Amino acid sequence: MPARLLLLGDVCSGAGRDALADVLPGLRRWTRADLVVVNVENAAGGYGINHKIAQEILDAGVDVLTTGDHAFDRKDAWRCFDDIPRLLRPLNFPAGAPGRGSLLVELEGFSVGVVNLVGRVFMKPLDCPFERGLAAVEELRRRTRVILVDFHAEATAEKQSMGWFLDGKVSAVLGTHTHVQTADETVLPGGTAYLSDVGMCGAFDSVLGMSKDDSLQRLLRGLPYRLHPALGDPRVSGALVEVDEATGRATSIERIQVHAGPHEPEPNQPPAPGVE
């Protein structure tokens, strides 16, 4: 049987967390996933992650948590990345940042490397994701051929470039960050599964998981309206990749989107610094 790797997109606030908890047990049985990776950089009120929420998502049956440009938005997140081994921050943060950006997960009979990278186009000017990513991949390949890369980036061109750059070196390059699932899934010639964005886990009656009204006020009036998480039409989005364990080559990739039950409002969370 091939290895089956499931990456679920950005969990956005309470609606995304509840949708994930509702859907994940059945989704894991249906996909027969050996490894479930979830991006949680928007899990705490739409901005960042905290210790309590990270642990709750792991306890729900997730194996590895990845993040992105909002990784350190909340003050207690700094401690999270050192305290929780399976919570990753982007590898290409400069040296000295808390936590780690890659991980080797031991499963029954084989192991999987997970690498978390963040882009630089229209994003923060961090270290080069190509150079830092390749070094991490080469290190992991000494121990496993099955490697999943979460590339958290804004620009489609940068994501596609990373796919071609790592083709034949990793099992999958899957994009996160935009919250909109793309339809360009493919297995590249070297055996790397690719998708520009796996989508989000959150309320789809929204603008990227946040209130439509708040988002429209920002755009129509040009004023810094505070964005609040939306609630309606919660869904879980991601991608499932099948991989030959011996070679690390992907044999298939499938987009996934599952509707969840209705979501109840969560207690108000204070905004993260600098996001009003």
Image (cartoon, rainbow, N blue to C red):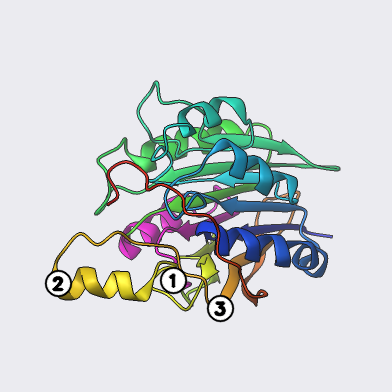
Crowd rating for badge 2 (residues with CA inside 10 Å; few <14, some 14–19, many 20+)? few
- Check disc 2 and report its element: helix, strand or loop: helix
Q: Quadrant of residue 122?
A: bottom left
Residue 63 place in picture, x, y as percent: 70, 46
Taking the spot 52% from the left edge, 52% from the top edge, the residue there is 43
Look at the image and tell me in which quarter the N terminus lies. Answer: bottom right
Crowd rating for badge 1 (residues with CA inside 10 Å; few <14, some 14–19, many 20+)? some
In this rendered view, identify the residue nearer to me: 153 or 2: 153
Residue located beneath label 1 in the image: 180
Residue range highlighted in magenta: 155-181
Taking the spot 85% from the left edge, 43% from the top edge, the residue there is 108
> Is 164 included in the stretch rendered in magenta?
yes
Residue located beneath label 3 in the image: 233
- Cα distance, mark 2 to mark 1? 25 Å
Q: Looking at numbered disc 3 in the image, what kind of residue is underneath it?
A: Asp
- Check disc 3 and report its element: helix, strand or loop: loop
Left or right: 100, with 121 as reference point: right
Residue located beneath label 2 in the image: 221
Crowd rating for badge 3 (residues with CA inside 10 Å; few <14, some 14–19, many 20+)? some
Q: Looking at numbered disc 2 in the image, what kind of residue is underneath it?
A: Arg
Q: Quadrant of residue 3?
A: bottom right
Residue 272 vs 30, above or below: the answer is: above
Name the N-terminal-most of marks 1 and 3: 1
Hey, which residue is sitting farthest top in the picture?
96
